[in-house]
Image: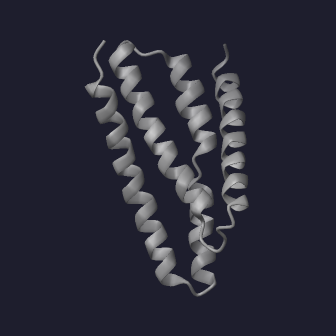
Amino acid sequence: MNAFLLVGAGGALGAMGRYGFGVMVARSGTLGFPYATLGVNILGSLFMGVLIGALAKFLPGGQNEIRLFLAVGVLGGFTTFSAFSLDAITLIERGEVMQAGVYVLLSVIASIIAVFIGLFIMRGISL
């Protein structure tokens, strides 16, 4: 299948998942802080670690189509660092500089840790 179609189809699914997660968080009544974007970035990073770890462990020759569809498409459409940047700027523009700093640090540090945990989980699994 064409690489662009794989990425596009995966991206559509990821974007719908991101939107659904945002709706769910909004319905919980947590407004004012970008919890949905923070949650999606952390979950997406965890899923990326698990996926890349699984591909390396179970398909060491690589399955480019799977990687394109899931990693680049689905997770690329699901994670939201462009929205993250906008949320950080919005907090700063509202004068909530401390919240913006906490948000940026938590997003970056927790996402990196989540990838590590995902890789650790997959590297520990043996069949």
- Rendering coords of residue 116 (x, y %): 32, 42
Residue found at x 71% / y 27%: 9
Residue found at x 58% / y 40%: 76
Residue found at x 44% / y 73%: 102
The tally of labels here is: 0
**Above or below 101: residue 72:** above
**Camera-side residue: 108 or 62?**
108
> In which quarter of the view is residue 6 placed?
top right
Quick one: quadrant of the N terminus? Answer: top right
User: Which scheme is used to colour this image of the protein?
Assistant: one colour
Residue found at x 57% / y 47%: 79
Quick one: quadrant of the C terminus? Answer: top left
Is residue 32 left or right of 46 when viewed as pictured? right
**Above or below 84: residue 6:** above
**Above or below 7: residue 81:** below
Is residue 114 left or right of 67 when viewed as pictured? left
Is residue 2 left or right of 107 when viewed as pictured? right
- Rendering coords of residue 88 (x, y %): 56, 71
**Above or below 123: residue 115:** below
**Camera-side residue: 10 or 127?**
127
Q: Residue furthest front?
A: 28
